[in-house]
Image: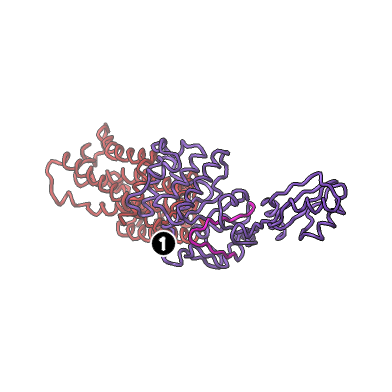
Chain colours: A red, B purple
Amino acid sequence: MYHLLKLEWLKLKNHRISQILIFIYLIALPSLLLIGKSFDEIPEDLFSKDMFFMFPAVWQYLGYVGNWLTFFVFGFIAVLTITNEYHNKTLRQNVITGLSRREYFLSKTLFIVMMSLLATAYFVIWALLFGATHTETIYMSKVTQYAGLIPRYFLMVCSYMTIGFFISTIVRRTGISLFLYLAWAFFIERILRYAMHYQLLEGKSIHFYPINATSDLVPFNTPLNKMAEGFMKENNFSIFLSPTEAVITTTVYLLLFLWLTHQMLQKRDL
Amino acid sequence: MEILQIDQLSKSYGRIKAIDRLSLTVNKGEVYGILGPNGSGKTTTLGTILGILHRDSGSYRWFEGQHDPKPLLQVGALLETPNFYPYLDAERNLDIIAHIKRIDDPNIDEVLELVNLAHRRKSSFRTYSFGMKQRLAIGAAMIGNPEVLIFDEPTNGLDPQGIAEVRETILRIADMGKTIIMASHILDEVEKVCSHAAIIKNGHLLAAGTVGAIINQDIMVDLISPDNERLLQILQQHLQLTLVDRQDTMITIQVTEDTDPAHINQIAFDNGLMLSHLVARKKSLEAEFLELTSQAS
């Protein structure tokens, strides 16, 4: 396992675009939340600007920022590093050199897990830092109230990257893969959802789609849209999957995509 | 020891049979040329035994199964184009090769010297000229001193000096006692470099064996005399020969290897025919190759 992770590290070490993307994540995750400090008018529900940074809400706000960022940053890293292997024919060379297809699959999967772990660790560090510096009285129960978000954040990054891995393995071309990754999230899945389910307000099945379930792992479920939730509740409708539903749905898709990717890699001529 | 045994291997792309029941055996220490025109199935054959293409039927075995399940760790190969990470320098690319091959203390310096790239070791691969890329690929194949090396059209696209360098490098590697499998469409290259050869066309094996046996050593003799027809009759009484070509003034005959051209002159002279032209040459490989491949079509 260490051997395969080291291989990925050797490949990534000087990959400029990945470095830039990681740098963007490192900078943007805390600074996007800091923009909250500059808001002039705060909706009444929020009490103060520091609301964004206090335990336990900081987990949710920072999680929401991370949700968007990881979709772009880590999804792109997955697509770029994997299509690179086709574009440069290095996957072919890796196999000729003696790496088995299974090992290649495992190394990419381990790479996804490792990147997701690091992204999550970074998220936890900032959440704790912000919380500790902005909360006047710190209760342990408040700090850990949303601890469930941490594994879900990890699963979310894994899922975005796996979708990138899956698309890149099918398509192999960098540009088309990136386009499909974005189009899937912003158009294809939405069109499919509404086309399949006409009625927006009826039936929950409309939510059980890969990108939607993944983004519901760390939802923007904060006082800001609590009001909207109230309206939705009256109509017996929720805009989000419950955490458990999101975890199960995402896990099922993640395993399915990994399995399909594995089968493609095994069966295909390189 | 049998390094590689291919048995009845077939592979098609849709309707096209790229290789068709191909069998051959490469033994330790041989420099084995796979010779065939473009599109004859050379690269497909190598791609299959290197694990990047799936076969339809048949089998192959490396090292009599001794290094299974990962025999390729003992093989260094260059297939078609040199494939490296363009953003990494030569050293780091070779590091990756060594890492995959699980070599702790790779001979990177030695290899870079061998292919004459030591001075560019820190430049990223994308800045290399084609010749340098090709040389790095040959170097990469040498990482870990594998017992077997595979080169697919190693001199393709190189300038004459590059071609000479690569051939020299391959011969040097062969002198180390390594087994080399080389695909080429250039006869001259196979003749100069290889000890054994297989000729394939349209995925079929046409001939296999030592270069000497495949490419027979008969001698071609061009002759001009005042009466070529009589000359031919006379020579036929004394020698085993075949008429290869008859032009306006010149005839070309093929005689066995041990025939002394002076003897031909003597026979003609003894029979009162003066030769104004006599050139003996080894039958050209080119002609032999064309003969072999056109017979099959």
Q: In the orientation shown, which residue stands out farthest toward the front?
A: B270
Where does residue A54 sit, x and y in percent of width and height? 19, 42
Label 1 residue SS: loop
Q: Which residues are magenta?
A: B22-37
Side of B162 relative to B240 (left or right): left
Q: Left or right of A262: which side holds B247?
A: right
Total of numbered circles in the picture?
A: 1
Nearer to us in this view, B179 or B22: B179
For the question of whether residue B56 can be seen, the reply is: yes
Q: Looking at the figure, which quarter contains the C terminus of chain B?
A: bottom right
Quick one: B223 or A65, which is closer to the camera?
B223
Q: Position of residue A22 (x, y in %)?
A: 33, 41
- From the image, tell me which residue sits under label 1: B70
Residue under the image location 51 percent in, 60 percent down: B49
Q: Nearer the viewer, residue B40 or A46?
A: B40
Residue B210 in picture, x, y percent from top left: 59, 59
Chain under callout 1? B
Amino acid residing under circle 1: Lys
Place residue B22 in its image quadrant.
bottom right
Left of B208 or right of it: where is B290?
right
Mark 1 crowdedness (10 Å alpha carbons): few <14, some 14-19, many ≥20: some
Q: Is residue B118 above or below residue A265?
A: above
Q: Is residue B61 above or below residue B77?
A: below
As for residue A84 lying within the magenta part, the answer is no
Is B32 contained in the magenta span? yes
Residue A168, image x and y in percent?
A: 46, 50
- A159 in relation to B111, above or below: below
Between A5 and B197, which is closer to the camera in this rendering? B197
**Secondary structure mostly seen in the magenta stretch:** strand
